[in-house]
Image (cartoon, rainbow, N blue to C red):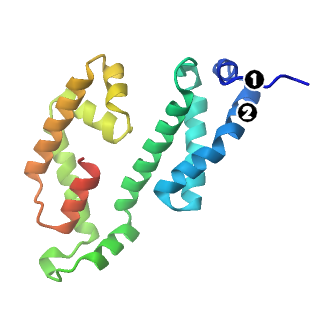
Amino acid sequence: MEKVKTNTELLLLLKKGDMIAFNAIYNKYSYKLHEFILMYLKQEEDAEEIVQEVFIKLWKSRDKIDVYSSFESFLFTIAYNASISLLRKRVSEKKSREYLKSLQQIDTTEQVIDEIQFKELDQKVQSLLEQLTPRQKEIYLLSREEGLTHKEIAQKLNISESTVNNHLVATLKYFKSHIDSNLVINILYICLFLQ
């Protein structure tokens, strides 16, 4: 009977493109990941989709895995970032906007949340994004679009974590000062996208 391989052994094989090792890792972690993601997303179908996405990302970036650092932490960070990205994406979907409309108590024409208003707000953010310095824009996109942590951005750009943090704080402060926070949709946008 073949001896059960350790995580390190499986990861070393995975880095070489070994599908058997990949399957073993999938079998070992897919259920745990599914339960973890379900806590955030509350929907079975979404959780299954994110689990698949996590393992696709793992396979694609297998050569970058550090076999001697915490693999579980690496895996669950990918899962967490993918879950948060999906939640942010859902905010911009019609169902979410309809739900927000039902929550809004103030019934004035001026404050009705509709698709046009959301698009205008998004265009405003894109326009503000173009006014940032190239470095601020790069850091913001790596953080918000790719879901990288401050540490990952620092390593990727070869700068300190505090520099990453300072750029993001300055960018978010700039965005908030140029976005009208009177409307519910604007407040929600700021909370979800600009934190």
Left or right of 130, for residue 49: right
Q: Is residue 130 above or below residue 114?
A: above
The residue at which mark 2 appears reads as: 24
Residue 114 position by quadrant: bottom left
Which residue: 34% across, 26% down? Answer: 151
- Count residues near mark 1 (Cα–Cα under 10 Å), then give few for <14, some for 14-19, many for 20+: few
Residue type, numbered disc 2: Ala
Mark 1 or mark 2, whichever is nearer to me: 1
Secondary structure beneath disc 1? loop
- Determine the residue located farthest toward the bottom in the rendered image: 107
Under circle 2, the secondary element is helix
Q: Is residue 96 left or right of residue 36?
A: left
Residue 128, image x and y in percent? 15, 45
State the residue at coordinates (58%, 51%): 35
Residue holding disc 1 = 5
Q: Are marks 1 and 2 in contact (CB under 8 Å)?
A: yes
> Residue type at mark 1?
Lys
